[in-house]
Amino acid sequence: MSDAHASQSRTALRICPLCEATCGLTLTIEGTRVTGARGDQDDVFSKGFICPKGASFGELDADPDRLRTPLVRKDGKLQEASWGEAFDAIAQGLRPIIEAHGPDALGAFLGNPNVHTMAGGLYPPVLLTTLKIRKLFTASTLDQMPKHVSSGLLFGDPFAIPVPDLDHTDHLLLIGANPLDSNGSLCTAADFPGKLKDLKRRGGTLTVVDPRRTRTARLANRHLAIRPGSDGLLLAALAYTLFDEGLVELGDLQAYVDGVDQVRAQLGEFSPEAVAEACDLPADEIRVVARELAGAQTAAVYGRIGTSTVEFGTLTSWLVDVLNVLTGNLDRPGGALFPLSATDKVPRPAAPGRGFALGRWKSRVSGYGEVKGELPAAAFAEEIDTPGEDRIRAVITVAGNPVLSAPDGKRLDEALESLEFMVSVDPYLNETSRHADVVLPPPPPAQSGHFDFAFNALAVRNQVRYTRAAVPLEEGLLQESEILARLILAASGMHGMPAEAVDQMVIERSLGKAVEDVHGKVHGRDAKELAAQLTGDSTVEQRLDMMLRLGPYGDGFGAHPEGLTLTKLLAHPHGIDLGPLQPRIPRLLKTRSGKVELLPEPIAAQLPRLAAAKDRPQDSLVLIGRRHLRSNNSWMHNVRTLNGGSNRCTLQIHPEDAQRLGLTDGADARVKGDGGEIEVPVEITDGVRRGVVSLPHGWGHDRPGTRMEIARENPGANYNQLLDGTRLDVLSGTAVQNGVPVHVTLASTTL
Ligand SMILES: Nc1nc2c(c(=O)[nH]1)N[C@H]1C(S)=C(S)[C@@H](COP(=O)(O)OP(=O)(O)OC[C@H]3O[C@@H](n4cnc5c(=O)[nH]c(N)nc54)[C@H](O)[C@@H]3O)O[C@H]1N2
Ligand SMILES: Nc1nc2c(c(=O)[nH]1)N[C@H]1C(S)=C(S)[C@@H](COP(=O)(O)OP(=O)(O)OC[C@H]3O[C@@H](n4cnc5c(=O)[nH]c(N)nc54)[C@H](O)[C@@H]3O)O[C@H]1N2
Ligand code: SF4
Ligand SMILES: [Mo]
């Protein structure tokens, strides 16, 4: 590199949006191009940690396949268009459908990256309320909805999700999660791997429950290779053992918990001996795990995907916290604690709340109950393709690729193709957005500011960070915030109004409510006077400033001058540490009783089903997923340096099963499930237990009409084609993606 060139390079900070760990990155920038990324050593939270995905930030940012203009369908073909044409097309395409058939003719799918962008945090709620969208589908019912339901029922707040106190716990029971590859989920911790190693270094113990011997399991003091789908039984047996052996000790929590005796009574059938066969774990070992959990000075139970997207996802998620409660570890340092983020609501005095209701309305076709205002993603296709006046006729997708991420992509492909109108907000023309009539591409991440609305509320340490755009917005692009604001205006009959109108409306409403809130920081003040105080270089930043100032650490618009504002945050480019997690019960509770309701009625009603599962005949082969360190669901297969090596779409199978089925390493296997069949290369490994095969999701990039050339070179096959979408976790409507029966044969023999 010449000196002249080097002198042009500079650095800029950017929080990584590529997983939940939210690492601070230091980007190297030449001109307007990101040429490197390393961990920001001074970041108050991530302290220099980075993974291969973060390191590829520049390559992702510069991907030539990213769309750089909107696309509008003309004469049946998607063609480049101006922003004006695109929003005109949306107003002309959507309005007549909504006017003729009402809001239920419009469906929305919100995908995972919405929790990784500021725009995705700020605008979808406005989109949903302005357009009165009830046909809402999101990645949550392919992911963590069971946890929302269990938290809603236990604590009265579906967002009150306790996280393991990784930095301080003495014992971690980690179930169905593989943070060494995923970098953690519903537990935001930069350098999760390092924190597990530290736990062991300080004499703590790690138990991992996973049908695969994952990289995380290899770190563990104890690995239980459980039969997929049986974790609910295991956890019930652990709780049973705590009661049976007199190990229940609620500690300070005692006064705030209702229903302990009822839980004891209901779990009578779940002795370790009774579940051992179904879990395929020795009863003695289950008892030892319960004793270790109870005996540890402090301990935390933490479950993720393997406890969530399974048949008894909500019961299993509930049992995770039942165990935290029964061992006195909920809401205490070293146990599982509730974070308090800078944009959370100010905690109010302890008082009974309104509780959490499920099934306030039902889906049209299968009659699934709504959960948190959503319908099961697995029912998206049927709500479109089943004839009826109330069917979905138009769809908006934002940051989602349900054709690959939700069950039965073929059916969804056809359903989306049959729509009268579809809009996708997405940087890529992929398996889903190729069906759209208008595609609106957001800019590459380096061109946007970043604040983690979702993940700061799930972090193992309270902290707040904000990074502005690292490079200027490219000519011809719009910020995603503006895209979503203009989409809201165009779809709701306000086409042509300035985008800022949306933010101004939100600010006016929020401040109006805030000044009326007797427990808030600005009660009785003049909302207009407060609005005039907001700072920031855009209305988006003004919204952030507002949220920070009204929040628990905020300056209350001058009421607490030392408190947080956007200006103060900008003065701390590596973030502000807000301290370790603190106990938050009872103020956090919003149940009707004002207590932790340990045995909610909907849960109790499902326990007989769980009990019956003990004695069911076992499927001879079941499928589970896996994630690779260099992957990100369905959309990062287009980054060349992240592909290849061990990041491949192969069917992992135990040597004994391979032999029984006549499969050899590298041969193609045909895998058949309820929803269809696929062919994938076999990878023989004793890293999966007997009776289990494992496949990664997010592959299947061989459909026509996409524009992701690198992904297409190595398309892989779509896991979710093996599902037909009828297997759901009953209480949450979440798709059962793990522990599903499949049939595997050698591909060539059946051709
Ligand atoms: N079998 C199986 N299926 C699974 C899972 C599993 O474990 N097994 N996991 C499930 C889970 S946990 C999840 S979260 C879902 C994820 O499924 P989806 O929510 O569908 O998300 P992705 O597959 O990550 O696709 C993300 C989309 O967002 C686009 N995108 C990327 N960045 C941006 C941006 O800044 N703005 C906008 N507007 N768009 C952007 C990408 O191009 C892509 O189209 O998949 C689920 N599906
Ligand atoms: N590299 C990478 N990181 C990611 C993602 C990615 O795609 N790639 N996706 C992100 C997203 S959206 C999410 S939600 C998180 C998910 O974060 P994690 O939940 O940590 O990720 P997974 O790798 O899916 O881990 C699930 C584990 O459960 C195991 N499992 C499957 N079935 C069962 C079962 O029945 N019982 C038990 N006990 N275990 C079971 C699997 O073998 C797997 O090891 O990761 C995030 N981070
Ligand atoms: S761990 Fe997650 S947040 Fe950190 S650099 Fe990797 S992808 Fe980005
Ligand atoms: Mo997820």
Image: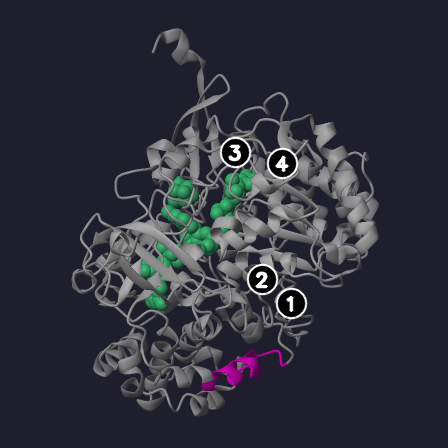
Query: Which x, y percent locates residue 87?
Result: 73, 34
Residue 463 visible to the viewer:
no
What residue sits 42% from the left and 33% below the top? 57
Q: Which residue is mark 3?
A: 445
- Mark 4 and mark 2 in contact (Cβ < 8 Å)? no
| Left or right of 94 on screen, residue 146 | left
Q: CA distance from mark 4 to mark 3?
A: 18 Å
- Mark 1 and mark 4 in contact (Cβ < 8 Å)? no
- The residue lying furthest to the front in this view is 751
Mark in the foreground, 4 or 1 = 1
Find out if the beta carbon at label 3 lies less than 8 Å from the nearest ligand 1 atom: yes
Query: Which x, y percent locates residue 336?
Result: 43, 66
As for residue 602 lying within the magenta part, the answer is yes
Q: Amino acid at mark 1?
A: Val
Q: Which residue is mark 1?
A: 365
What number is the disc on residue 379?
A: 2
**Would you call the spot at circle 1 few (<14 residues within 10 Å), some (14-19), or many (20 or more)?**
some
Q: CA distance from mark 4 to mark 1?
A: 28 Å
What number is the disc on residue 439?
A: 4
Query: Which x, y percent locates residue 431?
Result: 51, 43
Label 2 or label 4, whichever comes before in sequence order: 2
Q: CA distance from mark 2 to mark 4?
A: 23 Å
Mark in the foreground, 3 or 1 = 1
Q: Nearer the viewer, residue 602 or 507?
A: 602
Label 2 or label 3, whichever comes before in sequence order: 2
Residue 454 vertical placement versus 725 (above, below): above
Query: Which x, y percent locates residue 451?
Result: 56, 42
- Mark 3 and mark 4 in contact (Cβ < 8 Å)? no
- Mark 1 and mark 2 in contact (Cβ < 8 Å)? yes
Secondary structure beneath disc 2? Answer: helix
